[in-house]
């Protein structure tokens, strides 16, 4: 199953210009099987997620969130529906919360805002680093792979699409098809996927 773990929609991200349905249709058109909405500080309402999944089945739509930490790094969180995620977080607090809730946490576009990773990923290792997306500079990709290797965690490839034409830039090929969101989180946490980047 091909899944993009980082997509925005204009319904919940003011910086996005395509609607959630436009993003879903673009993901289907470029051959993806599933995607995760990760809007800035906003979860997808559960009823909306269920309606979208009914309408676009067998395509799968999951609800995550992108959180800008107080340290000014962005992280992706999946597998938790608690509205507390829409608040302010420091990285150690959020990491602890995600672990307690058995969720998944990844650092989005490392080195985008700072020359180094400014959160303590050694003491609080995330589940993945994002190694490819429209907001990952080509020159940072080798550093991200090295950092992930040092931490012993995988690299995910996504689009970070704010507009339909960005869909397909990166995706992750899961080794199994997850039955539900909890199963998706388990596959991601054990690294049962291959990140595929289409930008060269
Ligand atoms: Zn944005
Ligand atoms: Zn994003």
Image (cartoon, helix red, strand yellow):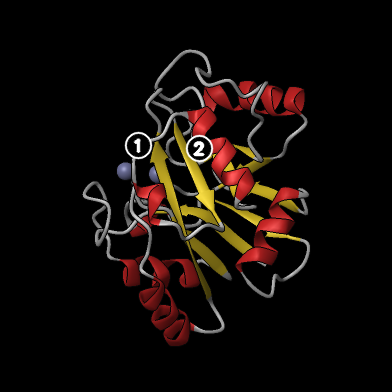
Callout 1: CB less than 8 Å from ligand 1:
no
Q: Position of residue 17 (x, y in %)?
A: 23, 55
The residue located at (57%, 36%) in the rendering is 95
The residue located at (78%, 49%) in the rendering is 190
Q: CA distance from mark 2 to mark 1?
A: 9 Å
Looking at marks 2 and 1 on the same chain, the residue that comes earlier in the sequence is marked by 1
Q: Is residue 103 left or right of residue 23?
A: right
Q: Quadrant of the C terminus?
A: top right
The residue beneath circle 1 is 88
Q: Is residue 106 above or below residue 13?
A: above
Q: Quadrant of the N terminus?
A: bottom right
When asked about the image quadrant of residue 68, the answer is top left
Q: Judge by depth and name the residue closer to the eye, 176 or 68.
A: 68
- Find numbered disc 2 in the image and state the secondary structure of the residue it sits on: helix
Q: Position of residue 15 (x, y in %)?
A: 24, 46
The residue beneath circle 2 is 94
Q: Is residue 30 above or below residue 89?
A: below
């Amino acid at each position: 199953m091909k899944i993009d773990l980082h997509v925005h929609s204009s319904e919940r991200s003011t910086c996005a210009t395509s609607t959630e349905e436009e993003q879903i249709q673009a993901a289907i058109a470029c051959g993806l099987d599933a995607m995760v909405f990760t809007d800035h500080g906003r979860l997808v309402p559960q009823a909306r997620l269920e309606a979208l999944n009914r309408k676009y089945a067998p395509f799968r739509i999951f609800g995550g969130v992108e959180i800008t930490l107080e340290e000014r790094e962005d992280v992706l969180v999946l597998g938790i529906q608690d509205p507390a995620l829409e608040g302010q977080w420091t990285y150690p607090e959020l990491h602890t919360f995600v672990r307690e809730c058995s969720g998944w946490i990844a650092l989005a576009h490392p080195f985008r805002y700072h020359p180094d990773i400014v959160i303590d990923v050694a003491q609080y290792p995330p589940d993945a680093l994002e190694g490819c997306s429209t907001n990952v500079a080509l020159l940072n990709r080798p550093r991200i792979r090295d950092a992930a290797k040092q931490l012993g965690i995988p690299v995910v490839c996504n689009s970070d699409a704010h507009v339909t034409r960005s869909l397909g830039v990166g995706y992750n090929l899961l080794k199994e098809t997850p039955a539900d969101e909890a199963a998706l989180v388990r596959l991601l946490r054990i690294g049962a996927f291959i990140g595929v980047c289409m930008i060269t």
